């Protein structure tokens, strides 16, 4: 570190004070408050009674919470396969010399990721609508009236139906990230491989995939972190319903805390979401590290 | 040169059959990508022309183009004060602009100090700021609601700026810190020799250099502030203070099944973001990707 950049301690403190207090007040104070309130039986009123870890033992045996957690994991898997998988395939296609309008595909493909999840939820709610929805209109148009239904009421496929908008929204986003990764690769590699007789699939698996490894891992990490906090579009589309068939952790925490006003248990759920999300993120990172080391590719 | 020669030789060998195969492949590839791009933009176009139909016409034919386009839906939603369209857009604009200002300002200052000034606890502070990226915001909804309401910070015109700035800071600090570390310290040294104070160097020399990074931060945060929903949902009960995403959820109840009306309200409230995106799409895509990959 250089001597020239040694301002007075008071100057540094003066500059750091406001952002520090602002940040701690809105991130760490609530976190500690949540841990504190989670030890109480509290319905939002003035009455609070200390019950120790009872909320947590309730949480551990709360089937709905763990089912919600499972739904979060389902979204993670669906998005890793759907978003990154499709984005990877589209990137290979766009990179081909045969494809035109590359700029348009980037601009249009990226567009959905800039709109709010609430708007996204509304758009897809309208697409799935049984009377005025595009999906049923399409099925009728191709003569398959028998397949039309009240989509968002079907418990058995509801998670798939809420996953589709999410996947759709971010394909373009991951496509653009992967394109930026592929742009850094020397194109001669592809040409040489082509001359050596590698076909498109071989090139994709043995050349592009290893070279894009780091970018792909960034995408996986974004996917995991992003889907652990799924909330907005589910709130607009189903509110976790029908019943609890599309409940995710954040939605469940919101319902318990703000609809049932069960703030004590809601706080315990908040802490639960915090711990479980961090574990999943850390776990996925460990898995990635283990996997990449094992393969010995770098 | 040698490689080019091989390439040309390879091309010469291609027969008419291979050419036809290539043509079919090109057609399939282009078709798939065009379909994908079309689905990405279709909802916007569908909403646009459908919003020009009265409800009755839309319900009779949901997909057809309007035969007699009308602005009646727009008139209805903007003239009725109960829908708070302009108000919510004003709230969103104010919240977004003020949040951006503080995120960029604080991110710049904190990022610079953490990159350049050595003091005890520098790394601890850095880690603390970065942790914000890992904390799932939804685990903070209940406590933030309690803390804000107990301190009287809830339900005010400035309420949402507080969490938006706090949760925008980590990525900003991170991007600025790594950017500053990548540039040499010579200019700051020269400035110090010339007698420039710390603050003056910070704002008149470092700030202009860091500008590209600050633009990236602004781009990322514009979208996340304008679109943010969860904090707005729990912290803003007063309908007059609602931001756009929250106001949208109210349309659902108010308009129930009047889709053209919902669509016109959605398009109107989305318009600033949509216009911004299509005007600056190149810069925006670049900025978002840079933020995602480095973050």
Image (cartoon, coloured by chain):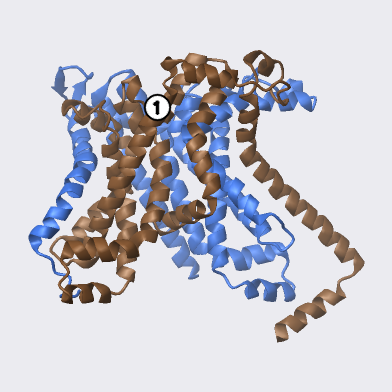
The residue carrying pointer 1 sits among few (fewer than 14), some (14 to 19) or many (20 or more) residues within 10 Å by Cα, namely many
Return the residue found at the far top: B56
Residue B79 lies, with reference to residue A240, above or below; the image says above
Q: Residue at x 25, y 32 (%)?
A: B144
Q: Which residue is mark 1?
A: B88
- Residue at 17% in and 25% down: A51
The N terminus of chain A lies in which quarter of the figure? bottom left
Q: Is residue B245 visible?
A: yes
Q: Is residue B184 left or right of residue A171?
A: left
Q: Can residue A74 be seen here?
A: no
* Chain for colour brown: B
From the viewer's side, name the closer residue of B195 and A131.
B195
Vertical arrangement, residue A286 with respect to residue A267, above or below: below
- Residue at 53 percent of width and 54 percent of height: B282
Colour that chain A carries in the picture: blue
**In x, y percent, where is residue B43?**
62, 34
Q: Chain of mark 1?
A: B
Q: Nearer the viewer, residue A62 or B229?
A: B229
């Amino acid at each position: 570190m250089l001597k020239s950049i040694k301002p007075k301690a008071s100057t540094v403190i003066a500059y750091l004070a406001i952002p520090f207090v602002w940040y701690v007040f809105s991130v760490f104070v609530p976190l500690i408050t949540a841990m504190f309130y989670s030890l109480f039986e509290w319905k939002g009123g003035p009455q609070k009674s200390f019950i120790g870890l009872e909320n947590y033992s309730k949480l551990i045996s709360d089937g709905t919470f763990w089912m919600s957690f499972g739904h979060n994991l389902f979204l993670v898997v669906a998005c890793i396969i759907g978003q990154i998988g499709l984005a990877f395939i589209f990137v290979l296609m766009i990179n081909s010399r045969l494809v035109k309008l590359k700029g348009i595909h980037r601009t249009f493909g990226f567009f959905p990721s800039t709109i709010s999840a609430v708007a996204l939820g509304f758009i897809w709610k309208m697409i799935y609508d049984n009377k005025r929805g595009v999906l049923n209109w399409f099925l009728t148009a191709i003569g398959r009236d028998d397949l039309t239904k009240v989509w968002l009421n079907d418990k058995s496929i509801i998670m798939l139906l809420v996953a589709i908008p999410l996947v759709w929204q971010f394909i373009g986003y991951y496509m653009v990230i992967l394109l930026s990764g592929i742009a850094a690769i020397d194109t001669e590699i592809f040409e040489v491989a082509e001359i050596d007789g590698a076909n498109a699939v071989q090139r994709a698996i043995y050349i592009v995939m290893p070279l894009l490894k780091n970018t792909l891992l960034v995408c996986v990490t974004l996917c995991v972190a992003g889907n652990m906090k799924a909330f907005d579009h589910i709130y607009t589309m189903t509110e976790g319903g029908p019943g609890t068939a599309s409940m995710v952790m954040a939605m469940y925490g919101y319902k318990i805390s703000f609809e049932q006003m069960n703030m004590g248990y809601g706080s315990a759920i908040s802490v639960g979401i915090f711990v479980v999300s961090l574990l999943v993120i850390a776990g996925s990172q460990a898995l990635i590290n283990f996997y990449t080391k094992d393969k010995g590719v770098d | 040169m040698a490689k080019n020669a091989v390439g040309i030789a390879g091309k010469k060998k291609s027969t008419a059959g291979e050419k036809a195969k290539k043509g079919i492949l090109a057609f399939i590839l282009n078709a798939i990508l065009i379909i994908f791009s079309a689905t990405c933009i279709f909802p916007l176009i569908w909403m646009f022309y459908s919003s020009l139909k009265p409800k009755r016409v839309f319900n009779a034919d949901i997909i057809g183009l309007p035969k007699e386009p009308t602005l009646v839906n727009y008139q209805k939603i903007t003239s009725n004060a109960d829908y708070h369209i302009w108000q919510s857009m004003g709230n969103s604009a104010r919240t977004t602009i003020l949040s951006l200002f503080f995120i960029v300002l604080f991110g710049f200052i904190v990022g610079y100090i953490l990159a350049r000034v050595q003091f005890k606890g520098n790394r601890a502070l850095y880690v603390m700021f970065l942790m914000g990226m890992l904390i799932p915001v939804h685990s903070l909804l209940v406590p933030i609601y309690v803390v804000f309401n107990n301190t009287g910070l809830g339900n005010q015109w400035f309420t949402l700026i507080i969490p938006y700035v706090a949760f925008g800071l980590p990525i900003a600090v991170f991007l600025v810190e790594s950017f500053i570390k990548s540039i040499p310290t010579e200019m700051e040294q020269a400035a110090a020799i010339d007698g420039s104070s710390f603050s003056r160097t910070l704002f008149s020399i470092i700030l202009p250099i860091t500008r590209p990074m600050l633009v990236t931060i602004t781009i990322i945060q514009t979208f996340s502030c304008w679109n943010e929903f969860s904090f707005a949902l729990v912290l803003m009960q007063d309908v007059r203070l609602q931001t756009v995403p929250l106001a949208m959820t109210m349309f659902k109840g108010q308009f129930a099944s009047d889709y053209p009306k919902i669509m016109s309200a959605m398009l109107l409230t989305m318009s600033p973001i949509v216009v911004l995106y299509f005007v600056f799409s190149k810069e925006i895509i670049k900025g978002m990707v840079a933020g995602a990959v480095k973050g």
